[in-house]
């Protein structure tokens, strides 16, 4: 079973490799690759990532990736 840190590192690596990644795609792939326990539907009805994973993600990317709320996507700074 994967850990939050492993999933967060996978996210960082994927975003850096592709320059831009949309939340919907990342959530879908996390569910497929790591299991449904790492994703949920947020209050707005959007697919979302487990909060522990997001906390680790923020630590790992250390500002090198930014979130675009209007696009619901991450991109390399």
Image (spheres, rainbow, N blue to C red):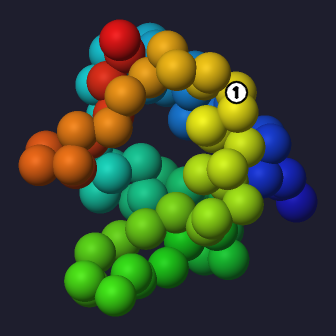
Residue 17 falls in which quadrant of the image? top left
Q: Name the quarter where the C terminus is drawn.
A: top left
Q: Position of residue 1 (x, y in %)?
A: 88, 60
Between residues 34 and 38, which one lies in front from this camera angle? 38
Q: Position of residue 25 (x, y in %)?
A: 32, 50
- In the rendered picture of this protein, how many numbered marks are placed on residues? 1
Single out the residue that lies furthest toward the left: 70
Between residues 63 and 11, which one lies in front from this camera angle? 63
Q: Is residue 29 left or right of residue 72?
A: right
Q: Position of residue 20 (x, y in %)?
A: 28, 25
Single out the residue that lies furthest toward the front: 63
Residue at the image point whose x is 29% and y is 57% from the top: 24
Residue for badge 1? 60
Q: Is residue 27 left or right of residue 39?
A: left
Residue at the image point whose x is 70% and y is 33% from the top: 59
Specify whether residue 7 is in view.
no
Instruction: From this view, report whether residue 12 is shown above or below residue 52.
Output: above
Q: Is residue 1 left or right of residue 75?
A: right
Badge 1: how crowded within 10 Å, few (<14), some, or many (20+)?
A: some
Residue at the image point whose x is 13% and y is 45% from the top: 71
Instruction: From this view, report whether residue 63 is shown above or below residue 67.
Output: above
Between residues 61 and 34, which one lies in front from this camera angle? 61
């Amino acid at each position: 079973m994967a850990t939050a840190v492993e999933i967060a590192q996978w996210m960082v690596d994927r975003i850096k490799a592709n320059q831009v990644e949309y939340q919907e795609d990342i959530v879908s792939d996390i569910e497929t690759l790591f299991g449904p326990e790492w994703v949920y539907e947020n209050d707005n009805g959007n697919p979302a990532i487990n909060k522990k994973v997001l906390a680790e993600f923020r630590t790992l990317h250390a500002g090198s990736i930014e979130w675009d709320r209007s696009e619901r996507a991450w991109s390399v700074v």
